[in-house]
Amino acid sequence: MLIESGTHTGLVRSNNEDRFLVKTFSDDSALLALADGMGGHVAGEVAAQVAMEAMERLDAASNHPLKNLVRAVFDANKTIVDSSRLDPSMKGMGTTVTSVFISGRTGFWVHVGDSRLYHFRQGVLHQVTTDHTIPGSLLKKGKISSEMARVHPYGSMLLKCVGCPNFEPEEGTLSLDSGDLLMLSSDGLHDSMPHSEIESVLALNIGLREKLGILIERSLKSSGNDNITAVLARI
């Protein structure tokens, strides 16, 4: 398995509230995770870091990887909620979380918010997770197109997050083949370009690092008004 990851603060914001985690294990399994924090002052950074620390404690030797992923997200939610109550400066903080544990030819994933997990196979890009936003909900119901959802004026308003009162993670499994690509991304990347453009970059006959560099570069040229983070893995 080959893995590349990267993040950029963007061209407008002074701090980066995105966090990511890449952890490999001796049995060739791997844990990929990404969080996009929100909240005033440094609260977003704190929430995202809490989420990644909870993920990092995941036990690869367990026979229940999906259950462990969900438990890690619940642990992060409790820590964030408790911290918000104890420290007024942290009030209202929260974060997205998207994480996948790859074991053999199976990906176990958990997700909250509008960061994403993508699956790329034989030239076709599929968005695995659903954005927990108003346009994400409309897209799931077939009422708008993916491009309409991308530029929707309420696209940045989360309906669910880790640390929010309506916290509720999604979970699932994914069958993988040799040569497949998985991508985790924050909205600073996938909201800056159409689905078809991301697909075309991933289809290029170049290395993962080069693909990642092009995606970040195009995000910056297109917008750059948000933090940009992505993790790519080739099975």
Image (tube, rainbow, N blue to C red):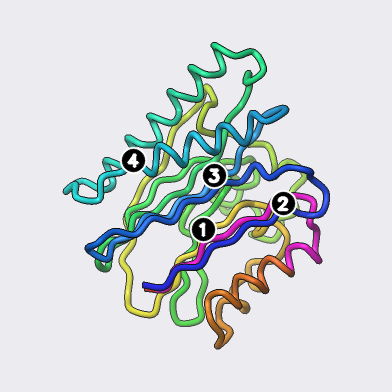
Report, in whole angstroms, how far the alpha carbon at label 3 lies from the one at label 2.
Answer: 14 Å
- In the rendered view, tell whether residue 183 sits above or below residue 84: below
Q: Real-space Cα distance between discs 1 and 4?
A: 19 Å
Give the structural element (helix, strand or loop) at label 4: loop
Q: Where, quadrant-wise, is the N terminus in this rendering? A: bottom left
Q: How crowded is mark 3: few (under 14 residues within 10 Å), some or many (20 or more)?
A: many
Q: Which of 35 and 23 is in front in this view?
A: 23
Q: Position of residue 31 (x, y in %)?
A: 37, 55
Q: Which residue is drawn at 64% across and 72% down?
A: 196
Q: Range of the magenta residues?
A: 218-234
The residues bearing labels 1 and 2 have C-alpha atoms spaced at a distance of 17 Å
**Residue pointed to by mark 2:** 9
Q: Distance between the residues labelled 3 and 4?
A: 15 Å
Q: Is residue 96 left or right of residue 135?
A: left
Q: Mark 3 points at which residue?
A: 35
Kindly identify the amino acid type of the residue bearing the numbered disc 3.
Answer: Ala
Query: Which amino acid lies under the numbered mark 2 shown in the image of this protein?
Result: Thr
Residue at the image point whose x is 40% and y is 46% from the top: 110
Among numbered discs 4 and 2, the one appearing first in the sequence? 2
Q: Viewer-proximal residue, 116 or 88?
A: 88
Question: Which residue in the protein does label 4 denote?
Answer: 57
Q: Is mark 1 on a helix, strand or loop?
A: strand
Do the residues bearing badges 1 and 3 touch, measured as CB atoms within 8 Å? no
Identity, as a three-letter code, of the amino acid under mark 1: Leu
The residue lying toward the viewer, choosing from 205 and 6, is 6
Residue 184's label in the rendered image is 1
Query: Looking at this rendering, what residue extends furthest in the left direction?
Result: 63
Helix, strand or loop at mark 3: strand
